[in-house]
Image: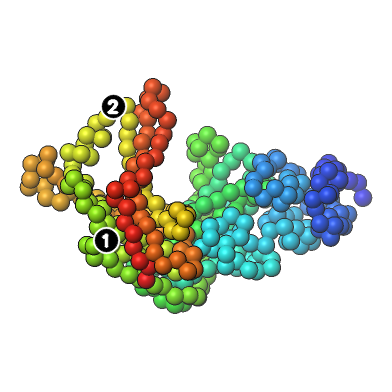
Amino acid sequence: MKRTMLDIRIKERLGVQGSQIPGEVKARIEQTLEGLPQERRRKKRSSISFYKWAWLAGIMLVSGSVLAASSSTFADAMKPLLQSIFASMGDKGVSERADQKELPILASKEDKGYTLRIHEVQYDGLRLSFSYSLSHKDGIPQEYYVKPAFQLDNSMKKMAPGVLNSDSGALWGDNKIGIVNYFFDRPVPDRLPLQINVPQIAVSGSDAIMKEMVSGNWSFEIEAVKSGTIAEKTYDDSYTVKQDDVQFGVTQSRTSANAAVWNFHLELPRKLYAAHMEDEHYSYGLKYEVSYGNELKLGVITSSGSSRIADRSLPEDHWVEVKDIRMFTEPVPKGVESVTVVPVLMTYPKTDKGEAYSEKPLQQFAVKIPLP
């Protein structure tokens, strides 16, 4: 059988990377190349940049595809290289509980040349996460960024109107892989029919400019079964710090094996807020850090907030900005009994003449809270 340039490149790569590839995997790839039908081989579109998965990414550079390979035999040969998207790119909330020996496929939907696959699901009543891969019959060019438009079905929105979501993704060969999280602010059923509508896929370039919005149907439904418990604690005014008409406090925490939710309350005089906003050289913002032990910090996954004026009947220079913040982080490690929450002032230069971006923890408003 005549060898193609793809075969030759793979053979060359195997020779270069041979010391880093387990012999069994190398042999399986070699055998698979010999048995691939000529007409079903895919042409490699582009090289992959090296990620932190050093030797894994090297193999992906060779194959050009892992999750949507040209034949089932080739896909079988590549299985040992990606056992869990949760473990490969997830935060501690999902990666530490990912224990499968090979990447499963729970659902698959193809339309307009794109195939969306759902691989893993974790659900504990506080957080629901699933991993996915997105492939195209012609491959996804390295310089493109593709993002499925995951939308909760209306029935789920009615059940949990306060749900927040996040979607993180990365390239893996000629494919996109990612993790979607949903965080719930109220009790939800132990058995949850995860109904997700995916009517579009956004395609943009490396310059973040939208190139195409592909319309189709990649919707799916999977039943998620709750595993784990949630601990909850409400905090009174003793966990609020007041200084110079500014006050900051922690009002509630909810923790599980997969995540933690923190509710904060901030009151800031408008005149102080306005003074910062009118600075011609800098703009400002606030973020929050949750630390434990020797100043170890929990990774932030997503957050939301609301803002209002306490009493608009007062003169404007007496207005008070009231903010309620809900922040989701990685789970608290076992054995930790308390955490410290600190607001952090972020300073952004507006012009090239300003200093670099900086962060300043506002230790005077640090609040230490016991965990439930």
Q: In this view, does 81 lie to the left or right of 134?
A: right
Location of residue 343 with respect to 207 vertically, above or below: below
Q: Which of 131 and 264 is in front in this view?
A: 264
Residue 130, percent across and down?
53, 63
Q: Seen in the image, is 367 located left or right of residue 82?
A: left
Circle 2: residue type: Glu
Q: Mark 2 points at which residue?
A: 280
- Asked if residue 40 shows in the view, the reply is yes
* Placement of the C terminus among the 4 image quadrants: bottom left
Q: Which residue is drawn at 78% across and 60% down?
A: 77
Point out residue 123 in the picture as x, y percentages from the top left corner.
49, 70
> Furthest residue to the bottom?
190
Q: Name the residue under label 1.
A: 239
Image point (40%, 27%), residue name:
355
- Three-letter residue code for mark 1: Tyr
- Whether the residues at callouts 2 and 1 have beta carbons within 8 Å, the answer is no
Ranked by sequence position, the earlier of labels 2 and 1 is 1
326 vs 190: above or below: above
